[in-house]
Amino acid sequence: MAYSIELSSIEVAELKRLRRGEKDGKILRRYQCVWMAHEGLPKKEIASRLGVNIDTVTDWVKLFNKERLAGLSKLHYEGRRPSALDAIKDLLIKHIREQSISKLSELQDFLEAKHSIAVEHSWLSRYCKKNSIALIKRQG
């Protein structure tokens, strides 16, 4: 792992305490990420278990190494611009259902043609996952 985590015995005890008491799922996943990285799990496996992108795991490990446990408990959303897709999220879901959209490329084409929004494939995938937007599985 390019970015490793080594916890002191005091940090191990503190992390266990924080994990047990954390109510916010976003922060809890960060704590779980740090624990798994400390245990030596590969970033790809951590990402899969937590349902996040591998880049997110890297970001959390970097954040921990910079600010330790205190840095993980702060969500830094101020100043982020909202996604252009947020305004048409309901239309996206409706289009997926009505047109039985099964591929992200089909969704990209719809966004470009009907809403003049160009979205990169992996970014659209993360947006759909984050917002629980499921494509239609075709029977094969």
Image (spheres, rainbow, N blue to C red):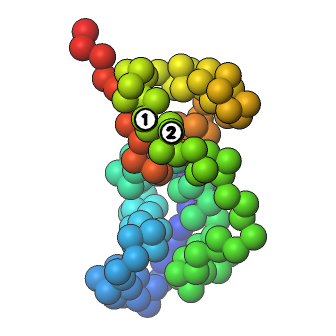
* Picture residue at 37% right of the left edge, 21% below the top: 100
In the rendered image, the residue lying farthest to the top is: 140
Q: Which mark is residue 109?
A: none
Residue 107: % across, % down: 54, 26
Amino acid on which disc 1 is placed? Lys
Crowdedness near tag 2: few (<14), some (14–19) or many (≥20) residues, C-alpha within 10 Å: few
Viewed as shown, does residue 9 lie left or right of 121? left
Viewed as shown, does residue 77 lie left or right of 103? right
Viewed as shown, does residue 138 lie left or right of 90? left
Residue 41: % across, % down: 41, 53
95 relative to 126, above or below = above
* Picture residue at 57% right of the left edge, 64% below the top: 60
Residue 75: % across, % down: 58, 75
Does residue 139 appear in this view? yes
29 relative to 112, above or below = below
Viewed as shown, does residue 65 lie left or right of 34? right
Q: Which mark is residue 91?
A: 2
CB-based contact (under 8 Å), mark 1 and mark 2:
yes
* Picture residue at 52% right of the left edge, 45% below the top: 89
The residue pinned by badge 1 equals 94
